[in-house]
Structure formats: structure tokens, C-alpha cells
Image (cartoon, coloured by chain):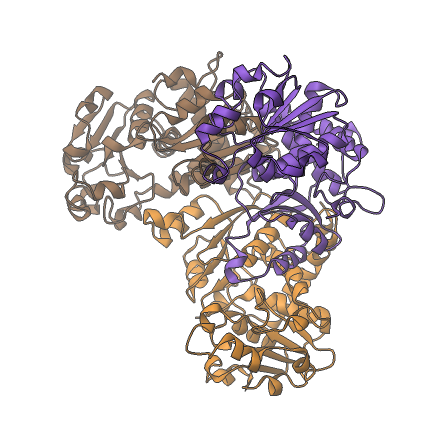
Chain colours: A brown, B purple, C orange
Amino acid sequence: MRAGNLQLDTYGRLKHFLAIEGLSRSLLIQILDNAERFAPLGDRAVKKVPLLRGKTVANLFFEPSTRTRTTFDLAAKRLSADVLNLNIEASSTKKGESLADTLRNLEAMQCDMFVVRHQTSGAADFIARQVAPHISVINGGDGRHEHPTQAMLDVFTIRRLKQRFDRLKVAIVGDVAHSRVARSEIHALRILGVPEIRVVGPKTLIPPAIEAMGVQAFHTLEAGIKGVDVVMMLRLQQERMQSALLPSAHEYFREYGLTPARLKLAHKYAIVMHPGPINRGVEIDSAVADGVQSVILQQVTYGIAVRMAVMAMVMGTQALSGSDVDSH
Amino acid sequence: MRAGNLQLDTYGRLKHFLAIEGLSRSLLIQILDNAERFAPLGDRAVKKVPLLRGKTVANLFFEPSTRTRTTFDLAAKRLSADVLNLNIEASSTKKGESLADTLRNLEAMQCDMFVVRHQTSGAADFIARQVAPHISVINGGDGRHEHPTQAMLDVFTIRRLKQRFDRLKVAIVGDVAHSRVARSEIHALRILGVPEIRVVGPKTLIPPAIEAMGVQAFHTLEAGIKGVDVVMMLRLQQERMQSALLPSAHEYFREYGLTPARLKLAHKYAIVMHPGPINRGVEIDSAVADGVQSVILQQVTYGIAVRMAVMAMVMGTQALSGSDVDSH
Amino acid sequence: MRAGNLQLDTYGRLKHFLAIEGLSRSLLIQILDNAERFAPLGDRAVKKVPLLRGKTVANLFFEPSTRTRTTFDLAAKRLSADVLNLNIEASSTKKGESLADTLRNLEAMQCDMFVVRHQTSGAADFIARQVAPHISVINGGDGRHEHPTQAMLDVFTIRRLKQRFDRLKVAIVGDVAHSRVARSEIHALRILGVPEIRVVGPKTLIPPAIEAMGVQAFHTLEAGIKGVDVVMMLRLQQERMQSALLPSAHEYFREYGLTPARLKLAHKYAIVMHPGPINRGVEIDSAVADGVQSVILQQVTYGIAVRMAVMAMVMGTQALSGSDVDSH
């Protein structure tokens, strides 16, 4: 899948946002820098800018999601766009319409942007290849492939708290094998020059060939997080807990749950991240999730700024100067 | 049902939009001309005008619909109205409230417009007779009665592509007997002076007395579309395919499916229309639906301009000059 | 539960709106006076003011509701806020997230206000104690505890129609025992100085210790409404009709249904109120619900003005002068 090219226009500008893989360091930095301009908005009395006024954003969620859809919805509204929230499964497929026909119709309604979440890897790419030239597609998570806005908000959070990437040790802990979040994070961290990326989890949840991605695999949490600056926890999916890949949630917590005692093995000022929603007592202890090293809620806050930045960029209306964000 | 009068105020202006039947040619032309003013908006960077700012539009859908509700929703938002999307069945009826009480309450909330879709013929008229004087009602499809905004977007599409109505031959193909779309289309085409209107379908799906509406009935597709300028396909409803009125979907396609070969019997420059969602391989072949003669997606695009025009007109705020649409 | 203090800031201004109990007379009057400023808006061509522009209101409804949610939604939109409508049960709890984590996340998304409806008494207080300092919580009904905006719109309606509170006789009729509406109404009427408050209903639906709230209990409708200026009917919940507490809906109507004949026992100019949705022929006869003494639909209209006033006040942006409401 050569998403790297598909998502850029002929001038190298972001047209779609489908995957971290294949993007340049300078483009990721540009997204982070634009997000910095949007971050202060959330603290203002008026949290809106008119950058996407008169644009129509369609949220196409084929897979249920509250958090991701809500933050994209908020990001679009704070950019003054009109938002259509479509629950695709519940609607058009009832009348037996194909996905392609649904897309054609939304294009004909002159939507400007599709935010897509789908259970199938490659769905966002597929849609980006199909859509009319005036439409931009943002991947809100596709199967086990990528979840690029999540990775960007993660690295935004890291940059805010650690300033630079070039001396960091980062551990990604959990079900790496089935995680689009982990894949996107690994790509983002590598592109941004993080020298040491570790993945940590039981052998059943770490892909055998993962080291080809430039990461080191660890199978005990203690060894995996030793000395790291950033611990990125993954959510253990319900279905995994019920599968043969894991003995039980309780057992998982005993081996891989992030407790205060284990966190002491990381760097003294290590930060703890999680894409949410968290499973307390499964992958993370409440004392850690709510502790001083946790930046989980900052991730949520920054997620809106990052999504605003990406939405503005793919529409060709990123804030070029402070005054674009200031004027309202 | 004398909807023709009910929907006009004492000055002959559109107050509700319930049915095509009974409207004058000049009023239909006025709707088309207003829609022409809104059509270019969709290509602008800012697809909004402030004509209905501060108005509240309630979408009352008693029957599920994605496309129609979405286009009304978009049309209202692009007019800057606030929109309430109410799924009536799921909500108030749970608590056992009557329709009349639901309407009284929405009026008391100072809604300005109801867009109504209902499975019962006459429901929109019934509601228009009930509502307070300040409220306008738009029929988004009632039983087998009418679907007037669909017919208006159809004739808008025809005028755009064929310029004039007075020499056209038009065939409406499919389940005419159960179709509110067909009824509204026939009225609109007659009022606008189309000299030859044909309905085409198996005898079980063509009402026996249809010729009283000023149309000719044909029972083979070949004869029915021979030489026509416009082929208006109807959607074959799922329930019809399972009923005794038809042998099977496959059989239907063999007899009445619009294929490239059959389309050759129509005029060389004939256009193919469909209200959507299309059943590929049932009433229409994909090669036709996606072919150069198909204007199905243009219908969707024009549908928004037509609905904006009707919504603005019933609110007494139609764009009188280009500058009303220009100012934003 | 000392909600009285929890909902005020250190300067005695409304920070949350959780319960009528514990609020001062002057604060209730201030809410009513602010609502008076918003009431004329509904009749204007543009029913919007920019007081909450750029604010985000999240409607958190853990219990289904059409009317209350719709009026809060409209009130927020008419204040120009952005609204998130979250059906909490259907969403985050699917992924097993706790209520506290859902709230933390909505805070991190920089929502400014939560409107909460919950089946558990005390839920709104609980949430108000939990949320970050920048968030205001409005109780949209919690269990059998309170429904304070309903009570405020009721007393707003009474003040509009009866001008003053200090000589009124008011009867609250129906299932007082299970009604949060009745509790809030009793508190509001007492605080505003209504000298005679009666509750009327079968013994099974009137709490034995109700007189401690400063009201008189009556067990026949005839005695209860004799000479009163205001009859506040309660909705008989479906579940009550099916329970052992009542013989049948028919029987209830025979004993406690408000008919024109019974209403004659009240003061000649008595008004009849109901929070809706009404059960025609159960607690109220249609001739009364639709009669000249009924102010039920005015309650709905005033409800929007009252909710706008409360939302603006908790955000610290109440209209201080007529010009704030005028400017749009």
C-alpha cells in the first residue's frame, strides 16, 4: 500500500491524511507546528475560528466510536464547518446501497471532507482512491492498519512534554499485533527520529517480524520499560481478553499491567500515555492512570488541536499566521 | 385532497410545499428559477447564505430515510438555519404522546418549519392543516401520494440538460402504482407542458386508470422508451420484489431492466434519471447507471439547490436578487 | 444533600443548576427576570443571540427524553453554542468505560457545560462534585430528586399569568411520591412565598411525611383543587399504571382525572399546568388540556427562555441589559 504518495498533491501538500507511513519528517513537523497554533483556542472564551466556514464534513463511521467521532465533530465545529454524522451501517446499507454509491452520493451533495472509520485495513485508502478530486479523506482508524491522527496527537503530546525526539526511549506496551494505533505510533516515532523504540507484550501479541520496523521486542514489562522516557500503553480489546491468545484479563494485569511499582523502572520523569478508553485494572492500574506521570487527558485535549490542524491542512486552509486563528 | 390551495397564502405565494398537483406553471418556474440562484453555491469555498439564520427547521421523519433527510439537513444548514433531527417513532411515541401533541409542542418551541416524511398518504397535508399559522410544512414524501421536492429536482435536472419542456418525450419506468415519486413527476411534467409522458411497467405495477392523468401506458420497455428524450427510472422497492406482484428481481431485470442495448432505443441524446438509491442489476444495469447518459448524481446535487429554494420560499425569504445569495 | 451551596460560587452566583432546594428567593427572581429578557426572542425573525458563541454544551442523557433534550438543544443553539448530543448508554459504556472516565474525557475536550439527565437521584450533584472547575452542570432531571429547570419554567409561567406569588393557592395533583417535578415545584413555590401549597392524590402516591415540606395533603381531587388559582398536574408514569399502587388508568381517571366539571371547583380564573407529555384521559381530560384555562403549551415556550437564562447565568454571561439580547 503506497499511501505515502496518495495522500500528497503534486506540490507535496497534504491532500488526504491516511497513514503516517511514507510521510516526511518535515510534513509531520508542519502538522505539529500547525496544531500548536490551534492548541490555545481551547482555553479561550470563544473556541471557534472561521477557517472551514461553509465547508461540509461527513463523519463516516462504519465502526462504533464515541471518542474519536466526538473529537472530530468538535474539531470540525470549532473550525466552523457544517458536520454530517452518518452511521453508515444503520442507514444506507438497509436499502442495499453499495459503499461506492453512498460515496458518490455524498460527493454529489458537495461534501468537502470524509472522516472514515472502518473495520477493514485499507478502507480509507480505498475511499481516497474512489472520491472526486475536490474531496479530502481523513483516516479515523482502519482495521489493523493505521490511526494516523491518534499517532500525531501522541507525538504532539510527547513534543510538548519532552521538547525533542532525538534522545528519547519509548516503549509501546500491549497488543501490538492487532493495533493500528501501535503501527501509526511506530511510524511517527521513527520518522521523527526517536532513536530507541521498544514494543512490549506477550509473544502472542507481538508480531514475529516486528523488528523489521526498527523496534526492539521485549516480553516482560520490567525489561521493556526499564529506563524509558515515554510509556505508551495500548488498550486491550475485549475480544482479545476472551480469545485463546490470552489466559485472562486478571492474568494479563499480573504480567503486563502498569503499576506504580513497575513504573518506577522507567525514567524518573517518564510520562505515561494511553489512547483510551482505558481498562482500569487490566492494562493499567488506576494509581498510574490518575497519577502525576499520566498525560492521558492531555492527549485528549491535544487531539482536538491536532485534528483541527489536519482538517485545515487537507482543505488547504491551514493557519499561516497567528492572525488566522486570532480572527473570529 | 385539495392541496393546491392549502399550500398557497392569500397572495398566491408558497406557504407550504405539499404536492405538485394543483400548483401553477408560473409557480413551478419560480421554484426552478430560485433554485438556479442557489445552484452555484455548492461550488463556492463558502457554501452558506444567511437567509434562514435564526430559524429552526425540524425534520420529522416517521419513515427511515438517509438521503432525503441528509439533503434537507444540508439545505437547511447552508441557509444557516438551526436543525432539529427528530426520529419521531423512536422518541415521543414511546411515552404514548399523540402526533397532534407532538406537533403542538414543536410549535410551542417556536420551530419555523417542519419537513415531514410519513408512510401515510396525506400526512403532510394533515399536518399543514393542524399547525400554527407561523409554521411552514414541506412534504418529504407521504405514502403513495407525493414527493414534490423530488419531482422539482427532477424537472430542474431536465431543464438544465434539455433547456425546454415543450417538445419532450419522457418515459417513467417501473413500479408506477406504488410510487409517490412517479405521481409527483407526472404532475410536474404535465404542468410544465411536456407533450408526451409515458409510464412503462408490468400490468401489475401500472394503475389501470393511469391514462386519466394524461399519460400513455406501455407494458414493454422497448416500446415504452422508444424515441424518448428522458428516461426516469423508479426504484423497485424491496417489498415489491418479495410480493406476488412480481415473479423475481432477476425476472424483472430481464423484462424491465435498463441495459445499454435497450437504452439505444431511446433518443440518441436521451438522459437517464433515478431518484436513488439504485438497485444495480434490478431496475438498472451498472453500465447505464454509470454511463455517459446517466444524470443520476447531478440530480442529487441539484436536489440541494431545489430544497434550499423551496425552504427559502415558504419562509418568505427567497433570494430576490443575486446579491442575497452573494452576501455571506 | 447540600446542593444549595454546591451550585453557587464564592460570590453567591449560580455556577451549577442542580436543585431548587437551598436557593434564595432573590436568585430565583434573578433567573425569572433573566428569562423575561429571552422570552421575546422566540417571536423574532432571528431567534439567536451570540452569548455562548464558541462554547461547547454536552447533553448527557442517561435516560431517554425527547422534550427536555430538545428544549435544551434549542436553548443552546439559540445562544449560539455548539452542542454535543451524547446518548451515554449507547456509547462509551459499550467499551466498558466508567462514568468518571467519560466525564474526564469530555472535560479534556474542553466542554463548558454538561446538561445531565439520569435515573439516579443525586447524579447531577455527583457529577458537579467531580467535574473540573471550568465546567458547569445543569440538572435535567435526576431520579426522584429534582428537575429544577422544569420548576423554574413553571413558576415563570405562573408569574407571567398571575403576576405575584404572595396570595396564591396552588394544587399539585398526581403521583407526588415518585415525582422529581413535584419536589422541585414545591421548593420553588415555597421559596417564592406562595402561602398555600396543596398536594393531591391517592394515599399510595402521596408520601406520608409530605406535610413536613410545608404543604397540605388532600386525597380527593374535589377537596384538593377547591378554590385554587393554579392546578399543576403531574404525568402519571406508565410503570405506575401497571403497578400495584393503582387499580387502573381508567379508575385513576375516574377519581383524579381533571375534567371540566371538576375544574369548576377551582378559582374561576385558575390556570391548568402540566409538564408533558400529557396522558389524555388518564390524568387530564382533553377538554381541559385544550381548554382556555390550560397554559400547557405556554410552559413549553417559556421553557426555552428559562433554559437560555440558566445556561447563560451558569456561564457567567447572562444578559445584563436589553442590548445583549438585542445585538445579533
What x and y, as percent, mark residue B183? 66, 37
Number of numbered labels in the structure image: 0
Q: In the depicted view, which residue is nearer to us: B211 or A65? A: B211
- In the displayed structure, B290 sits above or below C21; it is above
- In the displayed structure, C123 sits above or below A139; it is below
Q: Quadrant of the C terminus of chain C?
A: top right
Is residue C321 at all visible to an observer of this figure?
no
Q: Residue at x 24, y 48 (%)?
A: A285
What x and y, as percent, mark residue A206? 19, 30
- Residue A77, by quadrant, is top right
Left/right placement of residue B275 relative to residue C111 reads right
Q: In the depicted view, which residue is nearer to us: A66 or B167? A: B167
- In the displayed structure, B233 sits above or below A241; it is above
Q: Residue at x 68, y 76 (%)?
A: C165
Is residue C280 at all visible to an observer of this figure?
yes
What x and y, as percent, mark residue B39? 68, 26
Left/right placement of residue C214 relative to residue C240 reads right
From this viewpoint, which residue is outermost toward the bottom? C223
Q: Quadrant of the N terminus of chain C?
A: bottom left
Q: In the depicted view, which residue is nearer to us: C56 or C246? A: C246
What x and y, as percent, mark residue A237? 27, 41
